[in-house]
Amino acid sequence: MILPTVRDPRFVTIRRGGTLTDSDHHLLALWAAACAEHVLGLFEAVRPQDPRPRDAIGAARAWVRGELPMMQARAAGGHAMGAARELRGAARHAAYAAGQAGAVAHVAAHELGAAAYAIKAARAAAPDGMTDAAGRSECQWQRDQLPEPIRALVLDDQRLRNDICWSVFDC
């Protein structure tokens, strides 16, 4: 479970009664796409012919540019999650990260799912004894990518949802 039972109005767009601006929603989608893309190679090493996770990341970015409707970006995210189902370990988590990135166009709070699954992928790919360090390194890399306008929002979201995101944001 990566979504809270009660929606945080900071992740609901203004037109739907929340406080999230379109520009910040776009920044969340781009950050989620960057997080997913950072570990995408872990999926592609196992399934090089399966474009679904890469397509979901591209769909998130196309949605931000106004080139793709939200429903198509969300559908691409769902297809990436489908690519994950038969897999285990790092490849599975990387595909889920891409799926979550595609879903940000629909529900902005999926941004943390992309980040959390990317950290899980990095941990799963690490050699024995290095999983914690790999997770912390990935978490820090992600934080370094945060655009300033959404930095405080995402860091607070990580604090609030860390427990339901496998405590991966303890970095």
Image (cartoon, helix red, strand yellow):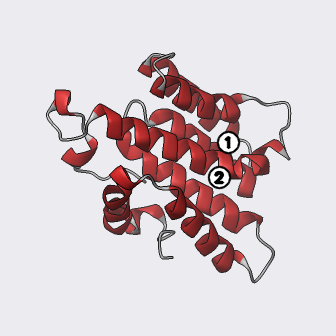
Residue 100 in sight in this render: no
Residue at (39, 69) in percent of width and height: 163
Q: Is residue 40 left or right of residue 114?
A: right
| 2 and 1 marks in contact (CB < 8 Å) | yes
Which residue is identified by label 2?
93
Give neighbour class at mark 1: few <14, some 14-19, many 20+ (Cα, 10 Å): many
In the rendering, at what x and y percent does residue 134 appear?
A: 68, 72
Q: Sequence order check: which comes first, mark 2 or mark 1?
A: 1
- The total number of labels drawn is 2
In the rendering, at what x and y percent does residue 93 appear?
A: 65, 52
- Inspect the image, locate mark 1, and give the three-letter code of the amino acid beneath it: Ala
Residue at (64, 78) in percent of width and height: 132
- Inspect the image, locate mark 2, and give the three-letter code of the amino acid beneath it: His
Q: Tell me, for residue 127, which label it has, or none.
A: none
Q: Is residue 98 left or right of residue 127?
A: left
Q: Tell me, for residue 84, which label it has, or none.
A: 1
Disc 1, SS: helix
Q: Which corner quadrant holds the N terminus?
A: bottom left
